[in-house]
Image (cartoon, helix red, strand yellow):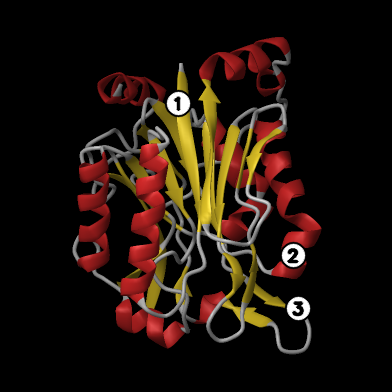
Amino acid sequence: MKVLLAAIQMRSGRAIAANLEQADRLLAEAHKRGAALALLPENFALMATDTERWEAAELAGRGPVQDYLARTARRLGLALIAGTIPIRSGTRVYAASLAFDSNGRVVGRYDKMHLFDMDLGPGERYCESAGTRPGNSPRVVPLAGIPVGLSVCYDVRFPELYRCLVTEGACLLTVPAAFTVPTGQAHWKTLLRARAIENQCYVLAAAQAGRHEGGRRTYGHSCLIDPWGRVMAERRTLEPGVVAGHYDSECLKQIRERLPALQHRRIPPPKRVGHGTARGGIVPAGEETRGRTRSGPRELAQALDRDR
């Protein structure tokens, strides 16, 4: 099975309407090129201060940005992973990555687990945890017939998360991001290729790129990497655009059969993260994440069959 995937590279600002217009144009281009699944970057709807993000944050399950995403996925017949949007939680927000099927239904939500607190030198210090709550549950969801492991940006530095996702059946890992230029130049592609190789998965990464309002600069280089670590497609310019390439289930199968590294593991897989056992893991297609018990590989296979 081959599925055309699209990573949407953007340069978002502080105006939500303008950001959604940019996203709409690029998603329409991805659809025109035949993509079945598209990934938006982190903060695609709003690149702003913590205060502005909290003021614009929506409640889970309702709000103009979530309505736009559901409507767009349905209109284009496109499975859509919506980078991150701020979902209000008390005085802070969750950086939520919402997955929509091609009928516009939410089939899963992942809240960014690892928050970027870092001092890169004069004038470039980040403290994401000041305004954002960390999530605590990995998520694998079925989209376009593929088991997709969700992650966000800084998560890519924590391989144990991805091992958890592949243990739960993930074959495609998504990384919406807003990497800084210094960390991007040093580590972006190395980290993405490492996650692809060690987990024998495809990795789809959609990035913010260029200079944003307020002076922040992001690295770009949205790309698709195959399970052998080969960069199959990459956006080498900082301009917004679409990167597209194929997920090939036969290629993935052959790599895993010829080099069965995932079967050779001696250290037990990491234990599930979440509120007890009820919040982590796989969410079958058509089910919300809230209040559901976790599902195993059999349930995921059934959900994928329904989604094809």
Q: What kind of element bears circle 2?
A: helix
Query: In the image, is residue 259 above or below residue 284?
Result: above
Give 231 or 300, whichever is nearer the viewer: 231
Query: Quadrant location of residue 262?
Result: top right
Question: Residue 178: horizontal and vertical position, in percent?
Answer: 58, 64
- Name the disc covering residue 3, or none: 1
Query: Quadrant location of residue 37?
Result: top left
Name the residue beneath numbered marker 3.
120
Q: Nearer the viewer, mark 1 or mark 3?
A: 1
- Name the disc covering residue 183, or none: 2
Mark-to-mark CA distance, 1 and 2: 31 Å
Query: In the image, is residue 252 above or below residue 116?
Result: above
Identified by mark 3, the residue type is: Leu
Say whether marks 3 and 2 touch (CB < 8 Å): yes
Identified by mark 1, the residue type is: Val
Write the residue at 60% across / 17% down. 251
